Image (cartoon, rainbow, N blue to C red):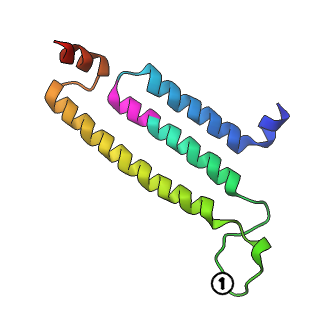
Amino acid sequence: MEALLTNYYEACAMILFGVGFAILLLHSNLIKKIIGMNIMDTAIFLFFIAKGYIEKREAPIIVDVYKGVDAYINPVPSSLMLTGIVVAVSTTAFALALTIRLHEKYGTIELDEIMKMKGD
């Protein structure tokens, strides 16, 4: 329990991931599934950004004086998370476009109803 209290960013990320996963499994509405997927993405980004942060170090932006390698955090995790955010936005846009197409074809965005119509 003490580890949960001291690692609250990681605990929050796990809770967010669980909420997103539950939304993904429990709802048949495609928009809600996309929202659940985005919550899971956010949880993963939060987890990796929290793991990439090092106490008492600054961002690797050199303004006046170079302070040495030990004074800065590693920029690779942050840049990878920025790339991941761009990919998540692109995936969300594509999923929403597919949802619009499904709504135009079937008249609904409920996955259960679409599966019933597809079976006929």
Residue 94 left/right relative to 57: left
Q: Quadrant of the C terminus?
A: top left
Residue 42 in picture, x, y percent from top left: 53, 44
Residue 95 left/right relative to 47: left
- Type of residue at label 1? Val
**Was residue 35 drawn as part of the magenta stretch in this picture?**
yes
Question: Would you place residue 3 above or below residue 25 in this image?
Answer: below
Q: Which residues are magenta?
A: 29-36
Residue at image coords 69%, 87%? 64
Q: Main secondary structure of the magenta part?
A: helix
**For the residue labelled by badge 1, is the local secondary structure a helix, a strand or a loop?**
loop
Place residue 32 in its image quadrant: top left
Residue 53 left/right relative to 22: right
Can you name the residue that lies furthest to the right here? 2
Residue 30 in picture, x, y percent from top left: 33, 29
**In this orientation, which residue lies closer to the viewer: 71 or 12?**
71
Residue 75 in picture, x, y percent from top left: 63, 66
**Was residue 43 drawn as part of the magenta stretch in this picture?**
no
Can you name the residue that lies furthest to the front here? 119
Q: Quadrant of the N terminus?
A: top right
Residue 45 in picture, x, y percent from top left: 57, 48
Residue that badge 1 annotates: 63
